[in-house]
Image (cartoon, grey):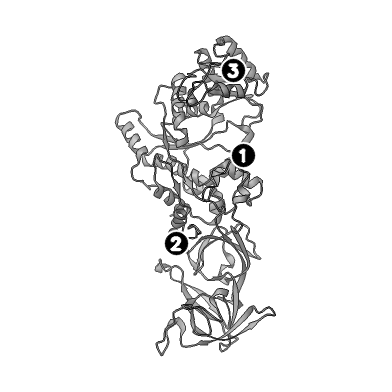
């Protein structure tokens, strides 16, 4: 069974389901259809995961359909690269769309609707500048002013719109505006622009169009044309709903018109969930691409080793509400940690190796040691690692002059090697700078597995890697990307560099791993005993495997005082 695939994960009720239940009960709709409508101008981030789970999950719950529709109405910022990346992210999360559509599939239809509005006297060509339109729009406390072109004759508007369409009008010279109400308390209803001149090559329609519809006009019409019953979107579109409904009514969409329902978007501390700002991080090379494991993009989380099931669990725990809030990143880490604790196989890897020579162990002997694959799943059994007279342990697992309650290797006490023997300190070697380079110990051959004839016990157990049967690995330790809880508080994006955590990435190039890890595959995730959870990075080669730390064994996202 592929645990990433979503089938019958029926979620508890929420206000969206309550609305839909009522709509079905009252016969407003005979079926349920949703859509996920990303703009292909960047990579999806964790905030999109919530929308994906809601859109696709709602369709699953009601046995309906959910389409993937790309909102490609702004060709200057869109790219096929983003289209493919978005499809990959949705599939990774475990969802499958019923159909793939593009807003550009409906350009002819949307254009016909614009002509219909003109014929009804509900749209006009405005030659005012954008600055003049903005100024005349008014404020939240003052009504807008009618454009001097508002009462332009229908035939004149049609002729000018045709010129715009043919490319005879320069960008910024004219726009088509809906004629609604310049005194409306909702600014979105004050004669919004519905078409503008844009002479840009489109990745699907080529150079066919010189005019492109605005989102608020294209979106409800695309929903209607596609047969969407419930248009689920984030809370910032709540004030756009009256315009959404106006467009549908004015364009004579009367047969099961789609209903817009808004939910609170996902805001997580210490991250950016704005595609525009994420793009700034990438283009300014503040991160290593969209899939940098420090990014909140889905591809970055996938590369870091986050399981899709854990991301979906995180979304479920947040729930669906109307109230905006900031979620602690520690909750996401907790979901990842819980999943991997149950499912990730255990491995012994030494991140900062210190060599230990066991003086009384035969130099020509190598024996097999059994350790559990995963203690939570005893049915998986054990795996075998080798043991010899030369091993590596972690540097901080040895101290010459330890503090109190230090139960690892030191001159004062012996320690147990995981699955192997008790060892006791004898001496150490140092370099010219006084750094310890090697520790000499003896072992008790009667203590294998932690049992001794005299019944003595040790308080410390440490892991190891056999020096004679190990591989070199590179370990990348990731921390949060920003030092401030809400990087989006800053005006613009110029201050991102000031807020970056300069210690968000530490690379350990000399780590040692058990030989059994030499054939791992990109994306595989393991628990490195006593260290955390790690995933194989795409930069891995046959010569050196690269591991990303997915998440620490304990919460690493708590506030640092």
Depicted 509 relative to depicted 93: above or below: below
Q: Residue furthest right?
A: 432
User: How dense is the environment of label 2, judged by Cα within 10 Å: few (below 14), some, or many (20 and up)?
Assistant: some
Residue 65 visible: yes
Q: In what element is the residue under mark 2? A: helix
Question: Which residue is painted at 47% across and 33% down in the image?
Answer: 237
- Residue under circle 1? 80
Residue in view at x 42 percent, y 51 percent? 313
The spot of residue 24 in percent (x, y) is 32, 32
> SS class of the residue under badge 1?
helix
Alpha carbon distance from label 2 to label 1 = 36 Å
Mark 2 or 3, which is nearer the eye?
3
Closest to the observer, 279 or 466: 279
Residue at mark 3? 126
Q: Quadrant of residue 103?
A: top right
Mark 3 to mark 1 CA distance (whole Å):
33 Å
**What separation in Å lies between label 2 and label 3 (alpha carbons)?**
61 Å
The crowd level at tag 1 (other Cα within 10 Å; few <14, some 14-19, many 20+) is few
In the rendered image, the residue lying farthest to the front is 141
User: What residue is drawn where x is 67% and y is 21%?
Assistant: 167
Q: Which residue is mark 2?
A: 343
First in sequence: mark 3 or mark 1? 1
Picture layout, residue 365 above or below residue 152 = below
Q: Between disc 2 and disc 1, whose residue precedes?
A: 1
Q: Are marks 2 and 3 in contact (CB under 8 Å)?
A: no
Q: Is residue 418 visible?
A: no
Dot placed on the residue nearer the N-terminal end, 2 or 3:
3
């Amino acid at each position: 069974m592929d645990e990433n695939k979503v089938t019958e994960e029926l979620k508890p009720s929420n206000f969206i389901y309550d609305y839909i239940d009522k709509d079905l009960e009252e016969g407003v709709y005979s079926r349920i259809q949703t859509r996920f409508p990303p703009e292909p101008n960047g990579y999806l981030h964790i905030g999109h995961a919530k929308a994906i789970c809601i859109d696709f999950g709602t369709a699953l719950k009601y046995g309906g359909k959910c389409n993937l529709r790309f909102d490609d109405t702004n060709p200057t910022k869109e790219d096929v690269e983003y289209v493919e990346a978005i499809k990959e992210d949705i599939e990774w999360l475990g969802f499958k769309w019923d159909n793939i559509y593009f807003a550009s599939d409906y350009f002819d239809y949307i254009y016909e609707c614009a002509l219909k509005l003109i014929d009804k006297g509900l749209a006009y060509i405005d030659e005012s500048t954008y600055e003049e339109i903005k100024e005349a729009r008014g404020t939240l406390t003052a009504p807008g002013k009618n454009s001097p072109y508002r009462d332009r004759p229908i035939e004149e508007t049609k002729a000018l719109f045709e010129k715009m369409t043919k490319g005879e009008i320069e960008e910024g010279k004219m726009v088509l505006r809906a004629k609604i109400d310049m005194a409306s308390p909702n600014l979105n209803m004050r004669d919004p622009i519905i078409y503008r001149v844009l002479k840009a090559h489109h990745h699907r329609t080529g150079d066919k169009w010189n005019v492109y519809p605005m989102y608020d006009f294209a979106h409800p019409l695309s929903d209607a044309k596609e047969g969407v019953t419930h248009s689920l979107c984030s809370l910032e579109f709540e004030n756009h709903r009256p315009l959404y409904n106006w467009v549908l009514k004015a364009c004579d969409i009367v047969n099961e018109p789609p209903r817009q329902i808004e939910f609170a978007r996902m805001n997580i501390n210490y991250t950016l969930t704005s595609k525009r700002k994420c793009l700034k991080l990438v283009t300014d090379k503040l991160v290593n691409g969209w899939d940098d494991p420090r990014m909140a993009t889905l591809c970055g989380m996938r590369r870091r080793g986050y399981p899709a099931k854990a991301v979906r669990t995180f979304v479920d725990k947040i729930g669906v509400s109307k109230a905006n809030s900031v979620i602690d990143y520690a909750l996401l880490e907790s979901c990842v940690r819980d999943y991997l604790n149950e499912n990730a196989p255990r491995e012994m890897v030494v991140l900062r190796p210190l060599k230990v020579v066991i003086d009384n162990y035969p130099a020509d002997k190598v024996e097999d040691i059994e350790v559990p694959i995963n203690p939570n799943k005893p049915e998986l059994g054990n795996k075998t690692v080798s043991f010899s007279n030369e091993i590596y342990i972690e540097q901080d697992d040895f101290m010459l002059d330890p503090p109190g309650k230090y139960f690892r290797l030191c001159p004062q006490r012996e320690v147990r090697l995981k699955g192997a023997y008790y060892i006791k300190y004898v001496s150490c070697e140092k370099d010219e700078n006084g750094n310890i380079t090697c520790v000499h110990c003896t072992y008790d051959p009667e203590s294998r597995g932690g049992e001794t004839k005299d019944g003595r016990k040790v308080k410390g157990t440490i892991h190891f890697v056999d020096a004679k049967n190990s591989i070199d690995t590179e370990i990348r330790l990731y921390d949060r990307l920003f030092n401030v809880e809400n990087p989006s508080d800053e005006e613009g994006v110029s201050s991102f560099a000031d807020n970056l955590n300069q210690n968000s990435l530490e690379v350990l190039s000399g780590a040692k791993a058990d030989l059994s890890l030499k054939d791992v595959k990109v994306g595989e995730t393991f628990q490195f005993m006593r260290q955390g959870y790690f995933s194989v990075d795409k930069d891995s080669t046959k010569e050196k495997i690269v591991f990303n730390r997915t998440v620490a064994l304990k919460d690493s996202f708590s506030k640092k005082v």
